Amino acid sequence: MRHIISVLMENEPGALSRVVGLFSQRNYNIESLTVAPTEDATLSRLTVTTIGNDRVVEQITKQLNKLVDVVKVVDLSEGEHVEREVMMIKLKASGQMRAEIKRTCDIFRGQIIDVTPTTYTVQLVGASDKLDAFISALGSASIMEVVRSGVCGIARGEKVLSL
Amino acid sequence: MVVRALKDEGVKYIYGYPGGSLLHVYDALFQQEDVQHVLVRHEQAATHMADAYARATGKAGVALVTSGPGATNAVTGIATAFTDSIPMVVITGQVMSHLIGEDAFQETDMLGISRPVVKHNFSVQRPEDIPAIVRKAFHIAESGRPGPVVIDLPKDMTTPTERYPYEYPKHVKMRSYTPITRGHSGQIKKATDLLLNAKRPVIYTGGGVILGGASDELTELSRLLNFPVTNTLMGLGGFPGTDRQFIGMLGMHGSYEANMAMHHADLILAVGARFDDRVTNACDKFCPTAKIIHIDIDPASISKTVQADIPIVGPAKVVLEEMVQLVKGSKKQPDADALHAWWQQIDEWRQRHGGRFRTDDSELMKPQQVIEMLSKVTNGDAFVTSDVGQHQMFAAQYYKFNKPNRWINSGGLGTMGFGLPAAMGVKMNFPDADVACVTGEGSIQMNIQELSTCKQYDLPVKILCLNNQSLGMVRQWQDMNYESRHSQSYMKSLPDFVKLVESYGHVGMKVDKYADLEGAMREAFALKDRLVFMDIAVDPFEHVYPMQVPRGSMRDMWLSKTERT
């Protein structure tokens, strides 16, 4: 099962490599990974999506917690949460395809953020499966390039991951 | 600043080898007398000496090695300590900060290389941070589940002409690191209830009892309950080896009675042990009828390979102490009738195998006899270090350790070359104690250059080389699994060890008859101020038994070359 694990860690050199190293060292899988500083400049927030059974994911959170730079770990998938990912996708867009792509884009509430006579670049925000759905909905449109941010997530309601 | 911080940490000996990036530090060492430096002949030995000091005392040992090859040579020793959770602080030199990343002479990314095998590592980026980093390093290494910590020290952080304010912090507070200090009382209560209701219990303890200084509490609890106790390879000495309640080591080369008892148990109390693959055999067949209580300071060790029914995260000493109080205060007594029957069963198993080995089929000395003699000559009271292989298993099986911290071996990583430097590290800190290194002719040659260090620092350890002229454990597996195709497990061109050690200025002895063994060994231990190397010819065809059958359950064992359970 897919899990979204959020990690609050010291914003120190080497901290990210410890997390990434842990995953490869222990043969855990990383589907996506995002990391950036938080409103407190001494802390970074890292979100990793991984696939594993309950035992593996329990080990992942325990092992992450053991890292000295890691302050807090939470498996967002254990509770109600919101997840988002940003995708930018560059498409060949000429002739009839221009209108077709624009329509699909509107349906998915995407935005065209860059235009040339032959291309569109579309920005789409949503849960990962929505981005996947958009790609398959494009059908015959020819994709030139895709870039995705990886998932970030936050718990619903009052629950927070902070010090 | 580095040397002063080590002094303030109370460090007496550091083990190391100088080099370009550490010359400022070595110059500072030269100008003081509080911290004494021990010059090894290879950096791996420095880490093993520091490691063995930690295993014998519970305090972090310190190694000091230069950048590049000095640091990489230390990696094996760091990994050895990491796998066995040994507290250690390793200071590695590094090239000047402005050269980092430019492939400078003797530059290597030690933070990257060491990362998977350290509890934590630091890179010094401002000289004024040195005291705080050193304090944190010791704190992290020694607290919680212990482990090695590396401090990478660029040369320009130690420039002697620059001065910085120095204050050694008394306390460490880290928001991201707060080791647990006690177990959950509710869980402990629940566990104690289970203990008092058990009919076929086994107490299975590991290195955590030794590291956590919990032997007394373990012994008290075990005696109160009259439960059988088995130790892992790392846990030997945690419970007295000659006690009636001790049923031997468990696992791959565990005793018949320990493995049988585990398999048939209805309750297992695991303390400071991690259900390692060398203990459990096939996890899905592990102890089918047992409920499992697991006490460990590291939550990640609990339910990692075998699911615990009652997990208790906390230091072994504190948790066991709480259990002792609960048992003492309880109205309920352990089930005496059930335990009587259980002990009868265990004693029957003990009778059936009980650590026997055959001595009648050849003239050759058996390695087991050598260990039994060592146990006899030293009254089970020596520090015994070992290398890795058959001799290690024989030492674990046949030396009766009555005290903790006396059995010093590389259990998790299985590092050949560990034994001699480990013996040196112990001897240096316990000059009056008997220190024996049980080794083989293969392992000893992996760090034999340290005979020179022994000469320089006058370290009269006793080396018992069980010489079977082959890599015995490798050959045993080849005998059992590869139709005796002895690929590369035979050592041709062995040196004359007696002459070799004599050339280093030590005493060499060659023993090839059992009749001469006791006399020679007593003579060796009587030579208090000399290193004695005993080259002991043992049966080259001997195997270590019992041996669990791969992918079987705990009770599936070979008991000799021909008998199987």
Image (cartoon, coloured by chain):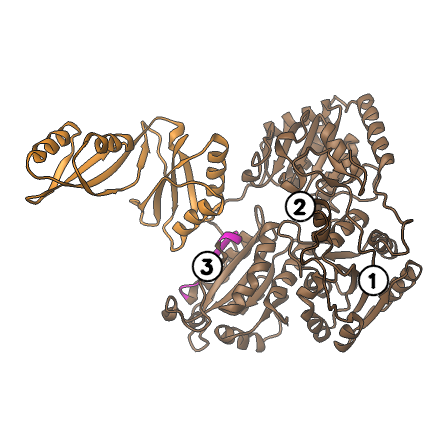
User: B321 or B50, which is in the foreground?
Assistant: B50
Q: Is residue B257 left or right of residue B138?
A: right
- Mark 3 crowdedness (10 Å alpha carbons): few <14, some 14-19, many ≥20: many
On the image, which quarter does residue B243 sit in? Answer: top right
User: B462 or B443, which is in the foreground?
Assistant: B443
Looking at the rendered structure, the kind of residue marked 3 is Leu
Of mark 3 and mark 2, the one earlier in the sequence is: 3
Looking at the rendered structure, the kind of residue marked 2 is Gly
In the image, which disc is placed on residue B207? 2
Look at the picture and state if B378 lies above or below B526.
above
The subunit letter for the residue under badge 3 reads B
Disc 1/disc 3 C-alpha distance (Å): 42 Å
The subunit letter for the residue under badge 1 reads B
The residue shown at (23%, 38%) is A86
Q: Position of residue A150 (x, y in %)?
A: 30, 40
**Judging from the image, what is the letter of the chain drawn in orange?**
A
Look at the picture and state if B144 lies above or below A152.
below
Of mark 2 and mark 1, the one earlier in the sequence is: 2
Which residue position is annotated with label 1?
Answer: B536
Which residue position is annotated with label 3?
Answer: B111
Q: Position of residue B548 (x, y in %)?
A: 72, 39
Q: Position of residue A158 (x, y in %)?
A: 33, 28
- Mark 1 crowdedness (10 Å alpha carbons): few <14, some 14-19, many ≥20: many
What range of the chain is rendered magenta? B116-126
